[in-house]
Image (spheres, helix red, strand yellow):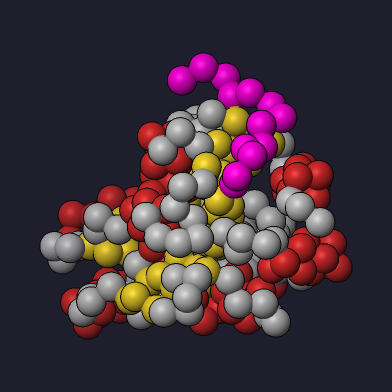
Amino acid sequence: MTEQELDPAWPEHAALFLDLDGTLLEFAETPDGVEITERFKALLRRLDRVEHGAVAFVSGRTIARLDELLAPHRFALAGVHGSERRRSTGRVAPAPIDSAALDPVRERLRRFATDYEGVLIEDKGISLALHYRQQPGLAAVVEQLGTNLAAELPSGWEMLEGNHVLEIKPAGIDKGAAIRQFMSEAPFAGRTPVFIGDDVTDEAGFRAVNELGGVSVKVNSGSTDARWHLPDVDAVLGWLEANVPQ
Ligand SMILES: [Mg+2]
């Protein structure tokens, strides 16, 4: 992959797929600590008004939590990296997954959070995330934990390492699959997908969008399959403000 180009081209008929944390919202020390700015709210109002309605958020958060952060708007959503999905019609299609299989892992993570201060466990039912943004010095210990857990995960589950987060989620489900599903349905079908994301978990989305002839945009630096690049949240907001129809 060559170096990404700056200033991505906005397609004539865009279907917009957006990651949230680290893309449209600055990271906070904890997932609940994110700041909802006036600028963000103004952008949401604009996104909610686009005539064709081909806008979806594609996030690691649950649909329930996304609705809270995006209120009062109700967008099409893919939550927990695509494990749950709400179409633009409002119909929710959750993945049939037995989360009790994760109980031993759940217990391991809880113990780890008790042993190390500043570690936060987010239990989304169908996935578990260990956040250590408050203690970045724990990276090596968390990596070791990840290696151990990877060897013991029940079948049907996989581990993802993101930006100061270790996440266990259903295998074979990712943001790329969620974007492909949206792209097969109205009002997304027939449009050119644009996907903006900042993390390892977004790479499957970038690859799907590349294959669909769309515009993949990586926020921040780091190795990526995205074709385009924007430096930070501020640049993403600016690019959307310049291009999303008024
Ligand atoms: Mg993100």
- The residue sitting at 51% across, 46% down in the picture is 191
- The residue sitting at 71% across, 36% down in the picture is 231
Q: Residue 11: say if magenta.
A: yes
Task: Please tell me whether the stretch drawn in magenta is mainly helix, strand or loop.
Answer: loop
The quarter of the displayed image where residue 98 is located: bottom left
**Residue 79 appears in the figure:** no
Q: Residue furthest left?
A: 155
Q: Position of residue 77 (x, y in %)?
A: 50, 68
Q: What stretch of residues is rendered in magenta?
A: 1-14
Instruction: Answer above or below: position of 173 versus 116.
Output: above
Q: Quadrant of the C terminus?
A: bottom right
Q: Residue 8: say if magenta.
A: yes
**Side (left or right) of 115 relative to 246:** left
Instruction: Answer above or below: position of 12 versus 240.
Output: above
Q: Nearer the viewer, residue 32 or 80?
A: 80
- The residue sitting at 71% across, 30% down in the picture is 7
- The residue sitting at 17% across, 63% down in the picture is 156
Q: Position of residue 76 (x, y in %)?
A: 52, 69
Q: Nearer the viewer, residue 87 or 58?
A: 87
Q: Position of residue 176 (x, y in %)?
A: 38, 49
Q: Position of residue 211 (x, y in %)?
A: 38, 34
